[in-house]
Image (tube, helix red, strand yellow):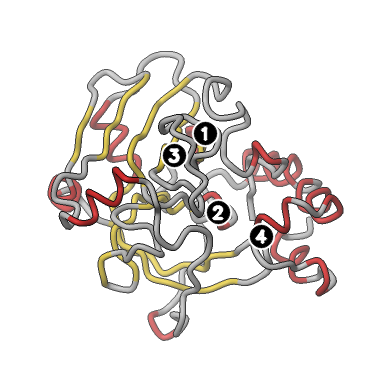
Amino acid sequence: MIQRRQLLTALPAGLLLSGCDALARNDMLKAMVKSGEQASYRWQRLVGRDGLAREFAASDISPVFKVNGTRLPTNPEWQALAAGGFADWRLKVGGLVQRELSLSMADLTRLPQRTQITRHDCVEGWSAIGQWTGVPLATILKTAGLRDGARYILFLCADDYGGKADGGGLQSSSRYYESVDLVDAFHPQTILAHQLNGQALDAGHGAPLRLRVERQLGYKQAKYLMQIIVADSLAPFGGGNGGYWPDRGYEWYAGI
């Protein structure tokens, strides 16, 4: 089976446009990228559900890890939290859980941590290797406890994607959000990262917390996390397709 990264690097240079907004307008590229989704999803679920993304040595870390997407949210709530050093920030966990959670950064850093050096593959065709440190998502979900019917984990963000805020709240279709199924949620390399290369995340890389789901493309790695919702359906969120870019025609699974 052709790897997704091979497909992206084989694309004509003219198709590797600047930014996902431009890519979203290119029907040919969207069709090429989306064509592999079901095959990739079935392959991983049949034979690779427990497989690990490649991890690298410290000597492999890229000298520059490109900032992509939003560099500085214009969301007033995020800006107020950032001004206070995120002392008042809380990650809320709710939905189909036995215990709702509200976790500060101090709460998160007291939990067992995982550090991994992995490659970030962007749908635009570039990649970078970075060291991420954070809490395994499985730890958070086990603490909250999943109720019957839980199928998806949704990540709601303070990311207005370059100033496209519409006042519609975190579930608005113009706000960045993403989702994974339970297999990827409990995968050992799926973490809520608060550090990149040994330093606290800066604004451009998603401060104070971002998702790392290492077997999927870059746009799945949601930045500026505010809330996690455990759900039985993707339909009530955004445009109902499981994420900001899937609502705009990109594939939901985005496996590599």
Q: Earlier in the sequence, mark 1 or mark 4?
A: 4
The residue indicated by pointer 2 is: 215
What's the amino acid at mark 3? Ala
The residue indicated by pointer 1 is: 181
Q: Residue at x 26, y 27 (%)?
A: 144
Considering only vertical position in the picture, is 254 above or below 141?
Answer: below
Considering only vertical position in the picture, is 73 above or below 97?
Answer: below
The residue indicated by pointer 3 is: 185
The Cα atoms of the two marked residues, 4 and 2, are separated by 13 Å
Label 1 sits on a secondary structure element that is strand
Quadrant of the frame with the N terminus:
bottom right
Image x and y of residue 7, in percent: 78, 63
* Residue density around tag 1, few if under 14, some if 14–19, many if 20 or more, within 10 Å: some
Label 3 sits on a secondary structure element that is helix
Q: Is residue 90 left or right of residue 179?
A: left
Residue 44 quadrant: top right
Image x and y of residue 70, in percent: 48, 58
Q: Which callout, 1 or 4, points to the residue nearer the camera?
A: 4
Q: How many marks?
A: 4
* Residue density around tag 2, few if under 14, some if 14–19, many if 20 or more, within 10 Å: many
- Viewer-nearest residue: 186 or 174: 174
Q: Is residue 11 left or right of residue 161?
A: right
The residue indicated by pointer 4 is: 123
Quadrant of the frame with the C terminus:
bottom right
Q: Is residue 31 left or right of residue 168?
A: right
The Cα atoms of the two marked residues, 2 and 1, are separated by 13 Å
Q: Which callout, 3 or 4, points to the residue nearer the camera?
A: 4
Residue 239 quadrant: top right
